[in-house]
Image: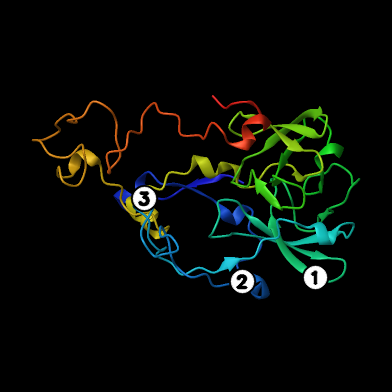
Amino acid sequence: MVTKIIKSRGPGKRVAVLVDKKKIITSNEPYKPLLISLKKRTGRNVYGRITTRFRANPYHRRLYRLIDFYRLDKKGIPAKVETIEYDPNRTAFIMLVCYKDGERRYHLAPEGIKVGDEILCDENTIVKIGNRLPLKNIPFGTEIFEVELEPKSGGKLIRSAGSFGVMMGIEDYYALIKMPSGEIRKIHKECYATIGRVSNSVYRLQRLGKAGRNIWKGRKPNVRGSAMTPRDHPYGGGEGKAPRGTRKPKDKWGNVTGGRKTRNPRKPSWSLIVKRRK
């Protein structure tokens, strides 16, 4: 799978570099029983108030694909990969698998998986791309993704395109995992993880080429504080590119943002972090 450079038909496409999905996608039609429609509330909380700025509903209509991050009820049942598909709701590709009992499910596709490959989730299965097994049975130095945070909670860590963690070792009841950020943390050794790395690793090489492509995704233009008026932002006002009129960096509401620790020092997971990310 490679990136493709768009033929120049105007300023917006002159510098665009996108992922060539035709190299990996095997089906353009999703599996309808696993599609649902989500209520659109981008950037809003449960009361309908905007809590994240510069977000909007995506320009294109899209349905949500139900991804199985657990697989625990399919222990010991082999599944065959039927299709590899694009998912508009995430950066990685997904795969439709058919289990031996006839049920079909969506899973995150690992890098290098092909149609016809067989995957398995089990306690002592072989270490192969796409297979899922507990951390205690994974050899040291193996690349993993879709890691559970607690036993039987489903894969929550390392799910974005091209990311992977590394199994570092076992210490008492915990496995040591090196995260994509460089952080080394303890996770209970009974937690499950999938072998390999997440697909679409060239996603980070994309250049969208124009602001409109971001708007299609639901990301509105992010306005600089210095371009606002004094009543709208602490940096606002002045003539031309005036320096900010405050010494410390602040957000729109005047809260200091730069150089201040935001993590709760009494958070229970502190004891599980062996080495912080740089």
Q: Which residue does the numbered mark 2 point to in the structure image?
A: 35
Q: Determine whether, in the image, residue 204 is placed left or right of residue 45.
A: right
Helix, strand, or loop for circle 2?
strand
As shown in the figure, which amino acid type bears the numbered disc 3?
A: Lys
Q: Which residue does the numbered mark 3 point to in the structure image?
A: 13
Residue 224: image location, x then y, percent: 25, 42
Q: Nearer the viewer, mark 1 or mark 3?
A: 1
Query: Could you tell me how far apart the alpha carbons at marks 2 and 1 are, in whole angstroms?
Result: 15 Å
Q: Determine whether, in the image, residue 254 is placed left or right of residue 140.
A: left
* Occupied quadrant, residue 75: bottom right
* Occupied quadrant, residue 106: bottom right
Q: Determine whether, in the image, residue 175 is placed left or right of residue 21.
A: right
* Occupied quadrant, residue 234: top left
**Residue drawn at (11%, 35%) of the image:** 240
Crowd around label 1: few <14 · some 14–19 · many ≥20 (10 Å): few
Vertical side of 167 occupied by 94: above or below: below
Outermost residue, front direction?
Answer: 266
Outermost residue, bottom direction?
Answer: 33
Q: Which residue does the numbered mark 1 point to in the structure image?
A: 103
**Residue drawn at (63%, 58%) of the image:** 25
Helix, strand, or loop for circle 3?
helix
Residue 203: which disc? none
Choose the circle earlier in sequence order: 1 or 3: 3
Q: How many marks?
A: 3
- Tell me the quadrant of the picture where the C terminus can be found: top right
